Amino acid sequence: MVGPVAAAAGAAFAAGVVALADPFKHHLSPPCLFHALTGLWCPFCGGTRAAWAFMHGDWRLMMHANALFPTMVAVAAWTWLAWLGRATGWWQLRAPQGRAVTIWVLAVLVCFTLVRNLPGMGALAPPARP
């Protein structure tokens, strides 16, 4: 049970840092290497700003910063709950796993990256950083 609890504590600490330090005003993470090299937005660009907006109840800004963020959080939560259930023996929730899931996740990430970088899809690009 130590692993899931430690992961939850780490996530809570990171969420607290993001909630208190506005990523629109302060750099909380290193610049995206993919964006720096290509000028294109990766599927994770804007994730810190989306997390900040989520924690402040600004759903519109969250979706503008990274429209894939709610799905990423849901998959991470499901995976964590499955891990906690296995670690404690309280329940057996199947975590998303296997080759088909990996292919599906990669396909979603690639498709989102392609769509958010198409001309006219500026609404999917993250808001400007400081």
Image (cartoon, rainbow, N blue to C red):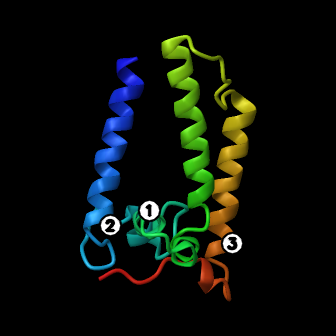
Q: Which of the two discs, 1 and 2, labels the residue nearer the N terminus?
A: 2
User: Can you say which quadrant of the picture contains the N terminus?
Assistant: top left
Instruction: Choose between 69 and 109: the one closer to the eye.
Output: 69
The amino acid pointed to by label 3 is Val
Q: What is the spatial separation of the Cα atoms under label 3 and label 1, in whole angstroms? A: 21 Å
Q: Is residue 67 left or right of residue 103?
A: left
Percent of width and height locating residue 71:
63, 54
Q: Residue furthest bottom?
A: 120
Q: Which of the two discs, 3 and 2, labels the residue nearer the N terminus?
A: 2
Instruction: Choose between 69 and 114: the one closer to the eye.
Output: 69
Q: What is the spatial separation of the Cα atoms under label 3 and label 2, in whole angstroms? A: 21 Å
Q: Are marks 1 and 2 in contact (CB under 8 Å)?
A: no
Residue found 57% across the figure and 33% down from its top: 79
Residue found 71% across the figure and 40% down from its top: 103
Q: Are marks 3 and 2 in contact (CB under 8 Å)?
A: no
Instruction: Choose between 62 and 97: the one closer to the eye.
Output: 62
Q: Secondary structure at mark 1?
A: helix
Q: What is the spatial separation of the Cα atoms under label 1 and label 2, in whole angstroms? A: 16 Å
The quarter holding residue 101 reads top right
| Residue named by callout 3 | 115
| Residue named by callout 2 | 31
The amino acid pointed to by label 2 is Pro
Percent of width and height locating residue 63:
58, 72
The quarter holding residue 48 reads bottom left
| Residue named by callout 1 | 51
